[in-house]
Amino acid sequence: MSRVIVAGDVHLGAHNANVEAFSRFLEDLYRDRTSIDEVVLLGDIWDMVRRDPFGVAWETATTLERLQRLAAAVPVQFIFGNHDVYLQELDTTRYEPQFRTEYTLEQGGTRIHFRHGHEFDKLHSNRLSRYLSGKGDRGDIDPTRGRKDPVVAGVRDAVNSLKTQLRSDGGTPRAYPRRERRAHQFLRSKAADKLVYGHTHVPYVHHDNLVANPGSWKSTAPVHNTYIEINEGRLALYQFQPAGDDERLE
């Protein structure tokens, strides 16, 4: 059976990143490496916005070692995210994971497209991300002193409550933000059957099984430590459980 694992938005280096859980997740993937065809990381694995890159790498060295070991055993595709400011400046031909801005694979006759998805977010600005990624020499250089994330989350929660229905489940309407709607519209422009993207930190599999988001590993997200598993072209959402079997959510 063909099996692809997709995860993203870990934000290693941020104070609310669940480093221990993601590190154990990588360990489990390595243990199950013979049953995995490929791993796709949808960007923002590290948080290099408002942080110095050396400090982030130093603090997450154990996780980086596990990722390197996994990449030596299983093909790992690394999609650049908007927080990967410094990674995009690397000579990526020298490293084991395949670094790219987008990726498409075929599984069971189904073409599946992967990208980070920040282009679907009209609040995002590459210029602002680079400005906040100053050349800090140590520690946290966040000029907002940690206030940005909860403020942005609160504003988005308020806005999302006003959005119109994009999908329904058993006849019950569900609000869907515009950035998710843009992702669905984007799929129509690609030579692909399905789309998996990140960035929003909101995990879901659409009811038509055409679009999915693996969510994030930030402990402040309502639902976190989640990933997508793809078998024979079908998308399924799971939540990682350090003890016991992972829980299927959608």
Image (spheres, rainbow, N blue to C red):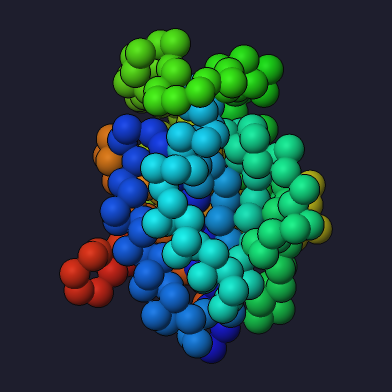
Q: Residue at x 71, y 73 (%)?
A: 106
Q: Position of residue 40 (x, y in %)?
A: 58, 61
The quadrant of the picture occupied by the C terminus is: bottom left
Residue 56, percent from left and from top: 46, 38
- Does 200 appear above or below 128? below
User: Front-most of 17 and 239?
Assistant: 17
| Residue 173 position in % (x across, y down) | 37, 40
Q: Would you place residue 152 above or below residue 190 in this image? A: above
Query: Can the viewer see residue 232?
Result: no
- In this orientation, does residue 246 appear? yes
Determine whether 24 is above or below 81 in the image. below
- Which residue occupies the foreground of this view, 64 or 99? 64
Looking at this view, is 171 or 41 the one in front? 41
- Residue at 45% across / 18% down in the picture? 141
Q: Is residue 51 left or right of residue 24?
A: right
Where residue 149 appears, x then y in whole percent?
A: 38, 22
Q: 166 or 81: which is nearer to us?
A: 81
Residue at position x 51%, y 70% from top? 69
Residue found 61% across the figure and 66% down from its top: 76
